[in-house]
C-alpha cells in the first residue's frame, strides 16, 4: 500500500498498491468502509524505492504522487483526476538513502501539502510544498527518528487545521506529533494517545476554537 488520495475526483479517498510485477492499482473507496474493484493505474513502477500520495502538489486540484528511484531521484507524477498519472518530472535528488518518505498533508499550515523524510542518521526533514509542483529547501524539524518503528500521518488529528504525525517508538509507544506552528517551529509530542485527550480534541474541534488550540501550543522541538 502506497498512500491514499482521491485520484479520480469522486470525493472519496482511494488507496494505491503496487504488485510484484510493478503494476500500480487503485482501489476506489465504496463510501461504506470498503473498496470497489481495483483499477489499473499504471505499470513499470517496480524500480521505485518509495511511492507516496503527495496531495495536490502542483495546485491543479488533482492528487499527485511522488516517487524515489534507486538513483535517489525524486519524481512527481501529476494526477490526471481520472485515476491515472501524467508524465513524470524530476523534482529533486539525493533521496537514495532516506529511511522513510511520507506525506502528512499540510504539516506547516500554509495549505500546501508537504513531504517528510527520515535521513540515514535519523534527522527528520520537512520539505514544504511550494504550490507549483515541487518542494522548497528542507527544514530540519527533528532528530533521533531512526529509532521509530513506524511513521505515518492520520491527517489533522488534534483539530488545529494542521496535519499531524504518528510515530511508534521501539518500545511500542504511539506518539502524536502535532503539525508545526509556522512562527515557532515544531511542537513536542504531547503524549501517547489516550481517550480523554482525544475526546477533548474532538470537543475543541466541534466548538471551532482552533485559535485557542493554536495559541496554547508550546513549540519546542520535534525530536522524539
Ligand atoms: Ca476517489
Ligand atoms: Ca495536482
Ligand atoms: Ca505546507
Ligand atoms: Ca493538527
Image (cartoon, helix red, strand yellow):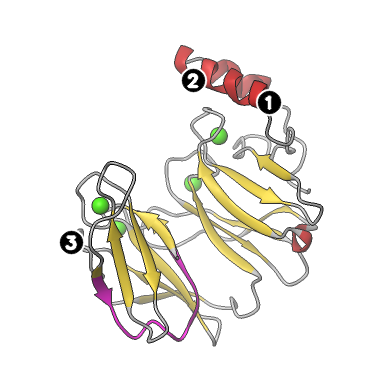
Span of residues in magenta: 40-52
Q: Quadrant of the N terminus?
A: bottom left
Mark 1 vs mark 2, CA separation in Å:
15 Å
* Residue in the image at 76% along x and 64% along y: 146
* Residue 207 position (above or below residue 115): above
Q: Of label 1 and label 2, which has the lower sequence position?
A: 2
Q: Of label 3 and label 1, which has the lower sequence position?
A: 3
Q: Secondary structure at mark 3?
A: loop
Residue 218, x across and y down, in percent: 73, 28
* Residue in the image at 26% along x and 66% along y: 38
Residue located farthest toward the top when viewing the structure as drawn: 207
Q: Is residue 48 magenta?
A: yes
Cβ atoms under marks 1 and 2 closer than 8 Å: no
Residue under pointer 2: 205
Q: Is residue 94 magenta?
A: no
Residue under pointer 1: 217
Ligand 2 shows up in which quadrant of the image? bottom left
Mark 2 vs mark 3, CA separation in Å:
33 Å
Image position of 79 (left or right of 21) = left
Q: Of label 2 and label 3, which has the lower sequence position?
A: 3
Q: Secondary structure at mark 2?
A: helix
* Residue in the image at 58% along x and 21% along y: 199
One can see residue 207 in this view: yes
Q: Residues within 10 Å of mark 3 (few under 14, many from 20)?
A: few
Q: Nearer the viewer, residue 29 or 84?
A: 29
Amino acid at each position: 500500500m502506497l498512500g491514499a488520495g482521491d485520484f479520480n475526483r469522486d470525493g472519496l479517498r482511494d488507496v494505491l498498491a503496487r504488485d510484484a510485477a510493478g503494476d500500480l492499482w487503485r482501489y476506489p473507496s465504496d463510501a461504506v468502509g470498503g473498496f470497489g474493484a481495483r483499477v489499473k493505474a499504471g505499470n513499470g513502477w517496480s524500480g521505485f524505492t518509495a511511492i507516496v500520495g503527495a496531495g495536490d502538489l502542483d495546485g491543479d486540484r488533482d492528487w499527485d504522487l511522488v516517487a524515489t528511484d534507486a538513483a535517489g531521484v525524486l519524481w512527481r507524477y501529476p494526477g490526471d483526476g481520472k485515476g491515472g498519472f501524467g508524465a513524470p518530472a524530476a523534482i529533486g535528488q539525493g533521496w537514495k538513502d532516506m529511511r522513510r518518505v511520507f506525506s502528512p498533508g499540510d504539516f506547516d499550515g500554509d495549505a500546501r501539502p508537504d513531504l517528510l523524510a527520515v535521513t540515514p542518521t535519523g534527522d527528520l526533514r520537512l520539505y514544504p510544498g511550494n504550490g507549483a509542483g515541487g518542494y522548497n529547501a528542507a527544514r530540519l524539524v527533528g532528530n533521533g527518528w531512526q529509532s521509530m518503528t513506524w511513521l505515518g500521518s492520520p491527517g489533522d488529528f488534534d483539530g488545529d487545521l494542521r496535519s499531524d504525525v504518528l510515530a511508534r517508538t521501539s518500545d511500542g509507544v504511539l506518539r502524536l506529533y502535532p503539525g508545526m506552528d509556522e512562527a515557532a517551529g515544531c511542537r513536542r509530542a504531547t503524549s501517547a494517545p489516550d481517550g480523554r485527550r482525544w475526546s477533548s480534541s474532538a470537543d475543541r474541534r466541534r466548538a471551532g476554537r482552533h485559535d485557542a488550540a493554536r495559541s496554547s501550543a508550546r513549540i519546542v522541538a520535534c525530536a522524539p
